[in-house]
């Protein structure tokens, strides 16, 4: 351990000030998310992996619902022996979180007994429970899709009256809103039903490999475990399929860079038979595979491919060009499976004892069983379901915007979910009593103020961590989900001390060395700035950015471990990647020349 | 080209011949037979040494005198060493040995008159798996003619009685009767880059990597420690290069015009440039894997890349440091495989 780092520590939460002029916007976040004096005693870190940008007050629900479910799975359902849940605070729109470790040996022993009765049951019955999970998740998605359209007609439809429904339309506004929230909170429980157990089995194998082969790279272990046919590859696979299909139908010349999806689709329609055939294939791909959003599902602004076709359409011209050059577009799953099998066998051969080999076999077997969940759940939870959720909230936004609560549909996200419920009750009341809603004179100024605060907060960097540095980080959730280790923290502290060093260290995520121009992309909306051969530098990379990976020459991220989806996609594309640099987006200047050494996990500023 | 009691061509010998060709000779023969690229050559077997020593023993006691010394009697060791080395270097070679070496030499050099050779000691106890005995005897590089070759054969024999060699054997109580010297004579590689590699990590013992150290010129500069080599670590299975430590290789060993080796300064910017390309690092790893597979255990290898870019191995011996450690299994199989996850969930303190 680095002695100076320990002494130094991170700034205390109480020293972090709300940026002047944004105090009221800060106060909009619920009382239980505000820092208090007692919080100075604890270690917190900025969850820039999930919340790389200031988060508006409605989107806070993505933290709230997620931590509620994560905590209950850890604390009460599976009873993880050494950790409870995650605490969460918000300041200047930035989400800080802290683990809740269990340290009392008696308590750990008591929880261990419970854990083995619960988690082991899950592992033993994984296939059955996972099949059941998919059914539950699809049921949840169908429920969300079946939520009624929001309508407040001038007069209640006659058929409702004649049928004696007896309940007026305004009631269904509140009912649907509450169901929307309920479904979203429930979805997060499903999300965490298997997640920690899945990561834990993977980390068990990872830990063994690191001891048996101290110099093995993280990415090699990841390659031994990674699934081949996981859902996260499907959206990108579908794009490749569509590219091939365009060539086969002879409509590939319609896809040109810089032409909007609308214009392309119109001209395909005009082409008649072959164009229509391609559009039919597009429709097949869209449901469900275009329900992937351009972020990680934690912001309302991360729209799905279905909502904004410009991302998938932007990728099509180069996929078509590659196919014409004779490149095989489909992923060669047989080859990938054979490579993985060979890799596992080759490392096994290097083990020195029969005991080691037997233990290795047991651990890789378990990791392979559980990993499809770890890789697959995101598509259903963070992408598909989350898109449905945010789009439903947009419908409420439309209803309110129409009636003058605020100018734009998207402004609805400037209200917390509590405030939104209040606004809807206001609307229901106004519809029922014929008076104008009170909200039209209440919300517009608040919405303006909060939007200005978000813009202001985005201009300020925030500390990567707060409070005293713990000696050991022994919380499996923090290590697994955020890749935060004692070594990371020391590196973050050192980064503050040595601003002159031209090297930035991170996790070696995908092998190779590349020099090029850095494109610092701070939000999903900026993806369009990337040019062929650029090096993507971002806070967190995301698999739905996969089409971007064919353009870039390397990737660097602030947060993430070797099993982050970015690392997986980078390896798929054979691009060098360094993840978990902590400060990459702050230290690398847009347009700067850098060298990315993905094998060593080092970025050099040139 | 035929082998005899005196001469053993690489193609005719292997590890099992170590008692008569020494560790180095046995290893070079073994690799030649396994089609691993090695500069061609032959071994002057220990029989030649034994006969010359036998002739000397008739005039004065040698082995029993050495055995009578204690390992801490440095002055006496130094005096005896000086005496014995001088005698061995001047002992006349029996006619048949002389002519066999000359004939083999001619065959090795062929029509190339100016063919430089390496004359290397290959002691029978050298590179024993239980004792790192390497480096205590002499090697002569860039030897250019038959008379010099004959001279250095005797110098190699004599180096068995160098001060450090005697001291080492006395310290470990090795019986003198079991110690003999064979001499390797092989074509010299005009190395562009040379060095050593280990088929495991010398730092962690990790068997999944090959660690390569190399510098410009002949490998002697690396082996003797006169230059800080570049260091590369490459994953044995995947070929990922995880470490590229490029050092300032300020000097290199090059052949001297009249035989032997000179040390010259390496100019900028070459001295700070990597001495191996990624493709060469990959090719070294391929050879390292083949050698390790052949021997069935981790190896410590000397290699060189000649002016045309071909890789040649000069030596391979079992790695001794990590292999001698008893490694407890990292984990044992569990009756319930799920117990393994407790390592992660059960707390690591």
Image: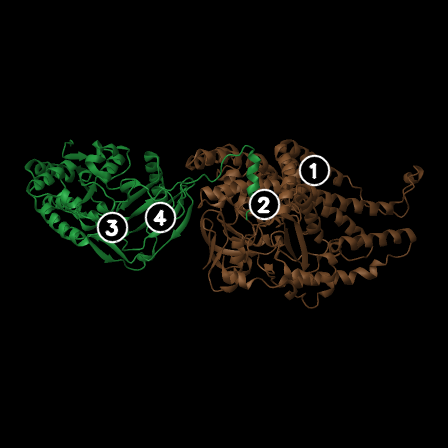
Chain colours: A brown, B green
- The kind of secondary structure element at disc 1 is helix
Question: Which residue carries the number 1 mark?
Answer: A137
Badge 1: chain ID: A
Question: Which residue carries the number 3 mark?
Answer: B220
- Answer whether labels 3 and 1 touch (C-beta < 8 Å): no
Query: How far apart are the two marked residues, 3 and 1, measured between alpha carbons?
Result: 67 Å
Q: Image quadrant of residue A521?
A: bottom right
User: Viewer-nearest of labels 1 and 2?
Assistant: 1
Q: Image quadrant of residue B186?
A: top left
Q: Residues within 10 Å of mark 2 (few under 14, many from 20)?
A: many
> Residue A365 location in percent, x, y?
54, 34
Question: Which residue carries the number 4 mark?
Answer: B277
Q: Closer to the N terminus: mark 1 or mark 2?
A: 1
- Is the same chain shared between marks 3 and 2? no
Question: Which residue carries the number 2 mark?
Answer: A543
- Is the same chain shared between marks 4 and 2? no
Look at 21% across and 35% down and name the residue there: B19
Q: Residues within 10 Å of mark 3 (few under 14, many from 20)?
A: many
User: Viewer-nearest of labels 3 and 1?
Assistant: 3
Query: How far apart are the two marked residues, 3 and 2, measured between alpha carbons?
Result: 51 Å
User: Viewer-nearest of labels 1 and 4?
Assistant: 1
User: Viewer-nearest of labels 3 and 2?
Assistant: 3
Badge 2: chain ID: A
Badge 4: chain ID: B
Residue A207 falls left or right of residue A481:
left
Query: How far apart are the two marked residues, 4 and 2, measured between alpha carbons?
Result: 33 Å
- Answer whether labels 1 and 2 touch (C-beta < 8 Å): no
């Amino acid at each position: 351990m680095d002695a100076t780092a320990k002494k130094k520590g991170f700034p205390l939460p109480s020293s972090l000030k709300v940026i002047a002029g944004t105090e009221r916007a800060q106060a909009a976040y619920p009382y239980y998310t505000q820092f208090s004096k007692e919080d100075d005693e604890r270690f917190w870190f900025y969850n820039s992996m999930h919340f790389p940008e200031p988060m508006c007050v409605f989107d806070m629900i993505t933290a709230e619902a997620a931590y509620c479910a994560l905590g209950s799975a850890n604390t009460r359902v599976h009873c993880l022996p050494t950790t409870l849940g995650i605490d969460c605070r918000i300041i200047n729109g930035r989400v800080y979180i802290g683990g809740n470790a269990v340290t009392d040996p008696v308590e750990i022993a008591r929880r261990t007994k419970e854990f083995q009765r619960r988690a082991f049951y899950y592992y033993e019955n994984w296939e059955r429970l996972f099949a059941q999970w998919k059914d539950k998740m699809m049921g949840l998605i169908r429920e969300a899709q079946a939520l009624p359209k929001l309508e407040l007609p001038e007069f209640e439809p006659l058929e409702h009256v004649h049928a004696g429904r007896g309940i007026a339309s305004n009631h269904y506004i509140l009912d649907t809103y509450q169901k929307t929230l309920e479904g979203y909170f429930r979805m997060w429980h499903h999300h965490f039903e298997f997640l920690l157990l899945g990561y834990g089995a993977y980390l068990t194998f990872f830990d063994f490999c690191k001891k048996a082969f101290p110099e093995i790279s993280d990415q090699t272990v990841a390659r031994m475990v990674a699934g081949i046919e996981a859902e996260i590859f499907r959206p990108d696979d579908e794009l490749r399929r569509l590219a091939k299909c365009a060539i086969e139908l002879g409509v590939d010349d319609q896809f040109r860079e810089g032409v909007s999806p609308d214009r392309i689709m119109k001209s395909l329609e005009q082409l008649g038979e072959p164009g229509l055939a391609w559009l039919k294939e597009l429709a097949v791909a869209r449901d469900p595979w275009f329900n992937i959003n351009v972020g990680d599902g934690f912001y309302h602004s991360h729209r799905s491919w279905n909502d904004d076709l410009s991302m998938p359409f932007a990728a099509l011209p180069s996929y078509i060009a590659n196919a014409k050059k004779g490149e095989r577009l489909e992923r060669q799953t047989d080859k990938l499976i054979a490579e993985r099998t060979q890799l596992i066998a080759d490392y096994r051969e290097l083990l020195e004892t029969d005991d080691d080999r037997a233990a290795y076999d047991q651990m890789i077997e378990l990791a392979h069983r559980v990993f499809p969940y770890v890789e697959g759940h995101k598509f259903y939870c963070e992408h598909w379901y989350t898109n449905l959720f945010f789009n439903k909230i947009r419908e409420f936004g439309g209803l309110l915007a129409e009636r003058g609560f605020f100018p734009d549909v998207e402004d609805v996200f400037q209200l917390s979910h509590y405030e939104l419920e209040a606004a809807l009750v206001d609307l229901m009341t106004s519809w029922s009593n014929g008076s104008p809603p009170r909200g039209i004179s209440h919300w517009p100024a608040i919405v303006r103020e909060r939007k200005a605060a978000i813009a202001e907060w985005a201009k300020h960097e925030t500390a990567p961590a707060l409070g005293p540095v713990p000696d050991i980080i022994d919380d499996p959730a923090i290590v697994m989900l955020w890749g935060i280790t004692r070594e990371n923290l020391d590196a973050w502290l050192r980064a503050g001390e040595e601003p002159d060093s031209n090297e930035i260290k991170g996790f070696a995520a995908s092998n190779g060395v590349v020099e090029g121009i850095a494109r610092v992309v701070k939000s999903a909306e900026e993806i369009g700035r990337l040019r062929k051969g650029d090096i993507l530098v971002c806070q967190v990379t995301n698999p739905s950015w996969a089409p971007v990976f064919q353009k870039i020459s390397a990737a660097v991220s602030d947060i993430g471990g070797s099993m982050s989806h970015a690392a997986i996609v980078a390896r798929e594309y054979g691009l060098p990647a360094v993840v978990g640099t902590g400060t990459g987006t702050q230290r690398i200047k847009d347009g700067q020349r850098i060298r990315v050494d993905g094998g060593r996990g080092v970025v050099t500023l040139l | 080209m035929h082998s005899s009691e005196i001469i053993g061509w690489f193609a005719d010998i292997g590890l099992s011949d170590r008692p008569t060709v020494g560790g180095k000779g046995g290893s070079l023969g073994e690799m030649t037979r396994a089609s691993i690229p090695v500069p061609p050559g032959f071994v002057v077997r220990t029989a030649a040494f034994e006969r010359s020593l036998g002739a000397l023993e008739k005039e004065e006691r040698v082995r029993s005198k050495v055995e009578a010394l204690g390992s801490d009697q440095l002055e006496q060791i130094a005096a005896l060493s000086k005496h014995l080395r001088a005698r061995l270097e001047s002992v006349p070679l029996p006619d048949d040995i002389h002519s066999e070496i000359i004939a083999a030499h001619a065959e090795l050099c062929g029509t190339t008159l100016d063919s430089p050779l390496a004359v290397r000691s290959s002691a029978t106890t050298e590179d024993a798996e239980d004792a790192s005995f390497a480096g205590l005897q002499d090697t002569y590089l860039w030897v250019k003619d038959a008379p010099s070759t004959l001279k250095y054969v005797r110098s190699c024999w004599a180096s068995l009685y160098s001060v450090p060699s005697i001291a080492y054997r006395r310290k470990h109580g090795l019986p003198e009767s079991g110690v003999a010297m064979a001499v390797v004579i092989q074509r010299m590689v005009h190395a562009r880059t040379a060095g050593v590699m280990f088929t495991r990590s010398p730092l962690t013992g990790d068997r999944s990597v090959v660690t390569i150290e190399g510098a410009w010129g002949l490998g002697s500069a690396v082996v003797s420690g006169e230059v800080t080599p570049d260091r590369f670590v490459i994953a044995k299975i995947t070929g990922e290069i995880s470490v590229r430590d490029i050092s300032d290789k300020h000097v290199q060993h090059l052949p001297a015009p009249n035989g032997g080796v000179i040390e010259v300064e390496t100019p900028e910017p070459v001295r700070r440039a990597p001495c191996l390309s990624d493709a060469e690092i990959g090719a070294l790893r391929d050879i390292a894997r083949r050698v390790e597979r052949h021997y069935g255990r981790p190896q410590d290898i000397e290699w060189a890349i000649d002016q045309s870019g071909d890789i040649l191995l000069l030596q391979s011996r079992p790695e001794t440091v990590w292999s001698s450690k008893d490694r407890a299994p990292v984990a044992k199989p569990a009756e319930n495989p799920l117990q393994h996850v407790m390592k992660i969930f059960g707390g690591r303190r």
